Amino acid sequence: MKLVAVSLLLAISLAGGADGHRLDEYLQATLIGVTRDGVDLEINLTPGIAVLPAVMAEIDRNRDGRISPEEEQAYSTEVIRDLGMQVDGKVVPLRLIGSRFPSVEDMREGLGTIRLNLRTGSSGHELRFENRHMQKVSVYLVNCLASGDSGLLAGNPVRDEAQRSIRFTYSYAGSSGWPAQETFWIAGIGMVTIARLALRRQTGRG
């Protein structure tokens, strides 16, 4: 119950930012989950209708109005190149472990979200993250998912004003309750997604 309550509060917080998302912005929301053996990231990229042509120009390289698997891979690689991750002051590589691209029709309605799941196998005591992808048309959200039940102790996160970057320190108090970490990570992702989609549909009906 405690995990669900904390996840719901985070979902409401991030969804509130999505509610103010304008049609001329590219909303990029990043969730960071720290584990004992690495760091997981989920990046949700939602283009507003007005900026969709600029986003599609980056994705649909052959201009056929479709997004092929090869174009999905190429765009995912481009996004990763625009991200910066440091653990304990050292730059660490991010590996794509999953992706989901919406239909072009959903994107044209402002409801399509590109989801990228990334991971680095490096862990330590201080994390820094920055998103530099398509800065001229984008707005950003970034947050860290963590549960005290997992033994993870995280310091207060410091973000820049635009929420393109975040840094925080972390350590582990012990191994008790470790499985709760993964449960919290998955629950948080799901609730944020549900809350954001619900708000979008409500806004679209208005």
Image (cartoon, rainbow, N blue to C red):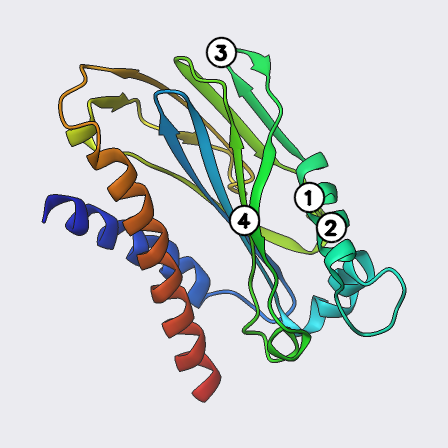
Residue 88: mark in rendering: 3
Tell which of 73 and 61 is nearer to you: 73
Question: Considering only vertical position in the picture, is 80 above or below 157?
Answer: below
In the rendered structure, which disc, 4 or 3, sits on the residue that comes first in sequence?
A: 3
Q: Distance between the residues labelled 4 and 2?
A: 18 Å
| Left or right, 57 with reference to 191 | right
Q: What residue type is labelled 2?
A: Tyr
Q: Distance between the residues labelled 2 and 1?
A: 6 Å
Q: What residue type is labelled 3?
A: Asp
Q: Foreground mark, 3 or 2?
A: 2
Q: Which amino acid does label 1 sit on?
A: Val
Residue 140: mark in rendering: 4
Question: Considering only vertical position in the picture, is 64 above or below 86?
Answer: below
Q: Do the residues labelled 2 and 1 touch (CB within 8 Å)?
A: yes
Residue at the far right: name it.
62
Q: Name the residue under label 2.
A: 75
For residue 206, say whether it is visible. no
Quarter of the rendering containing residue 22: bottom right
Q: Distance between the residues labelled 4 and 3?
A: 24 Å
Q: Distance between the residues labelled 3 and 2?
A: 28 Å
Q: Name the residue under label 1.
A: 79
Q: Where is residue 165 in the image (x, y as percent from the top left)?
A: 53, 34
Per the image, label 4 sits on a secondary structure element best described as strand
| Left or right, 83 with reference to 193 | right
Per the image, label 2 sits on a secondary structure element best described as helix
